Image (cartoon, rainbow, N blue to C red):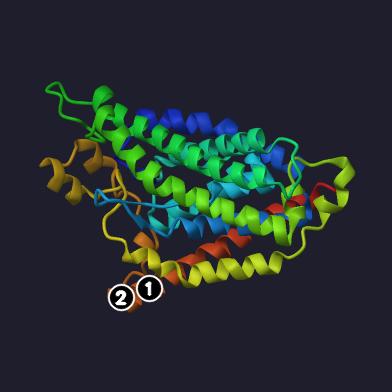
Amino acid sequence: MHIPDGYLSPQTCAIMGAVMVPVMGTAAAKLKKTLKDKQVPLLAIGAAFSFTIMMYNVPIPDGTSAHAVGATILAIVLGPWAATVGVSIALIIQAFFFGDGGILTLGANIFNMAFVIPFVSYYIYKLIAGNSKISSRRRFIGSIIAGYVAMSISALCAGIELGLQPLLFHKLDGTPLYAPYNLMQAVPAMMFAHIIVAGPLEAVVTGFVVKYMQKSNPAMLKIYPPKKSEVESLQVIGGLKKYFHVLIALIIFAPLGLLTQGNAYGEWSGDEIKSKIGFIPEGMNKFGDKWKALFPNYSVPGVKSTLVNSSLGYIFCAITALVIILTITAVISFLSKRRYL
């Protein structure tokens, strides 16, 4: 679902970027009001979890691949605005440091994964859970449905964005300038991958974490929305160390994502596009691969590509991302503390 540069026209990128600027501004403002200082480490773990879970590529029957996003559990625990910030941090790091998703297309990618998924999933979850007890089965079921539906709608948005390109941006003879597949091709392809694999994966991950929290740390499910009558649950999260341990385990086993063959739909290189349609659209030649990531495709430049080296490089990149995320959230925490000085 990470749309690379060259797949969307500059006009589309500009519109999506312009849409997300006020959204991110609002998210930052909301974060200041709802996220307590002691909860900032949880935001860091959530952003790192989202980054890492997206490294676990899962094969699709049509030869492509897909992955979960982890945005639903962030929305349920910290609220949709905090989830938007957390997943956005992960996506920005992926784009700039690892070349996963484009720089120009960041607005579209953040909209699809860091805005649509958190808000759709949160309100579906709240609709199903209602005012039920934290231990209620309704919350568990609601989290599963929320994750599945939100991923599907996010895929629909990405499919529409890609499918509109050949309709709106093409040469006089109809040759597409950017993403080459129309709506009737792009939307079903995106929906297929996410309805049968990525959606269920997001649902299972979310449901498992919610069930675990219901039994081991129900206070985590009381953080959002904040209530004055539950000050303690807002201030003391508890047990963060065990979640960090889980994150480290996910990082260690992240190379499992390398076992999947085939890129996700709409994330092909220029050569792969040429092999599929016989040419590389001009826009892809012009805007694709302009940004040279420090660790392209989660690899360490200059290191010989073997299974062991690739696996170690994958882990190294995940740890690097974790350090960057912790640094960013430390800055957020510092700025948050300064508000009260």
Numbered disc 1: secondary structure: helix
Which residue type does callout 1 highlight?
Ser
The residue carrying mark 2 is 307
Image vertical order of residue 137 relative to residue 319, above or below: above
Q: Is residue 153 visible?
A: yes
Labelled disc at residue 311? 1
Residue 106 image point, x, y percent: 44, 42
Residues 26 and 135: in front is 135
Number of residues whose C-alpha sits closer than 10 Å to that of mark 2, classed few (under 14), some (14–19) or many (20 or more): few
Residues 143 and 109: in front is 143
Q: Quadrant of residue 28?
A: top right
Image vertical order of residue 84 relative to residue 187, above or below: below
Lateral position of residue 239 relative to residue 173, left or right: right
Lateral position of residue 197 relative to residue 135, left or right: left
Q: Quarter of the image containing the N terminus? A: top left
Number of residues whose C-alpha sits closer than 10 Å to that of mark 1, classed few (under 14), some (14–19) or many (20 or more): many
Give the total of numbered labels. 2
Which residue type does callout 2 highlight?
Leu
